[in-house]
Amino acid sequence: MKFLEFLKLIRAVHWIKNLFIFVPLVFSGHLFQKDYFSLSLIAFFSFSFLTSVVYVINDIFDVENDRKHPKKKFRPIAAGLISKQTALIVALLMLIAASSLAGTLNFRFIFVSIVYLILNVAYTFYFKNVVLLDIFSIAGGFVLRVAAGNVVISVEPSSWLILISLFISLFLAVMKRMSELEVVASTGSHGTRKVLQNYSARFIDQISAVCATGVIICYTLYSVSERTVEILQTENLVYTTPFVVFGIFRYMYLVYHKHQGENTIEILLTDLPTIVNSTLYLLMTIVVVYNIFYVNNIW
């Protein structure tokens, strides 16, 4: 039981967010090359340990607010299952593990990791209470994951992929705020997150529409851009666009009609249509990028 509480403390299930590190690997065409994959895998675990450090620090700092939240009150520190002192030791061990792995990679990856840590510590202590800066800080974390994936395998970053990562992470952050507003509406208190006082349902609706549009437009333009077609030697990536559009619309449906969205990972791991769509998207992308079953451009 104690072991499970430690897994909850470091939020191991949230490591799935660090799969963004593999985005440059997949779209650069190096997924099936052992050396490149090994570097990305080490980077994934290094970043995962680092994100756990951030989660633990955030839970220690936010323990009182978490105890007022209907779901967060069950987190190990808020529930009194793990002491702050023990949590600090865990955070230190995670930091040592992250540093040890990062030390085997190039300096640029280490630099990105440091920037990520500074950004998230700043978010925990200040940015999370500043309207708009809070969601941009969350988005910045995902963009840095993609950047880490680029630098660790030394491939030229795609401006389109950076923009896609920015808009999709902004979209997820805004949807999270929408779900939190619904919690506020049901409890009548902003105590769990003060910044929510500066958001309204209408404002969130407008931002989410802009972000969703940004994701779809940027991905579509990326799939048909000259650089993409030249690198992949095919125009067929455009056929993966419907999966992206469906994924965005499905997520909005779950937030607005099923009142989900506060926990992105829960949706990704439990919503069957989302799981099927994500799997089909991944398979289709690999087929297109790596020219599997590709014959004479007759798709």
Image (cartoon, grey):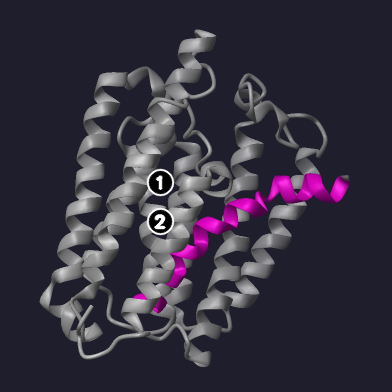
Q: Is residue 66 left or right of residue 225?
A: right
In which quarter of the view is residue 157 placed? bottom left
Q: What residue is shown at x 53% (from left), y 17% (from top)? A: 191
Q: Is residue 20 magenta?
A: yes
Please say whether residue 112 is visible from this viewpoint: no
| 252 and 71: which is toward the camera | 252
Q: Position of residue 249 (x, y in %)?
A: 32, 41
Spot occupied by residue 275 in the image (x, y as percentages of width and height): 50, 52
Region rendered in magenta: 2-27
Q: Please state which of residues 38 and 86 is positioned toward the viewer in this rendering.
A: 38
Left or right placement of residue 216 versus residue 168 in this view:
left
Give 159 or 31, whichever is nearer the viewer: 31
Q: Secondary structure at mark 1?
A: helix
Q: Which residue is mark 1?
A: 138
Residue at 50% over, 43% down = 264
Left or right of residue 16, residue 177 in this image: left
Please identify the quadrant where the C terminus is shown. Answer: bottom left
Q: Is disc 1 in contact with disc 2, using a CB cutoff of under 8 Å?
A: yes
Q: Position of residue 49 (x, y in %)?
A: 63, 62
Q: Is most of the magenta stretch helix, strand or loop?
A: helix
- Find out whether residue 213 is within the magenta segment: no
Residue type at numbered disc 1: Ile
In the rendering, at what x and y percent does residue 31 appear?
45, 82
Residue neighbourhood size for the residue with mark 1, other residues' Cα within 10 Å, grouped as few (<14), some (14–19), many (≥20): many
Pointer 2: what residue?
142
Q: Nearer the viewer, residue 16 or 3?
A: 16
- What residue is shown at x 25% (from left), y 43% (from top)? 212
Residue type highlighted by circle 2: Phe
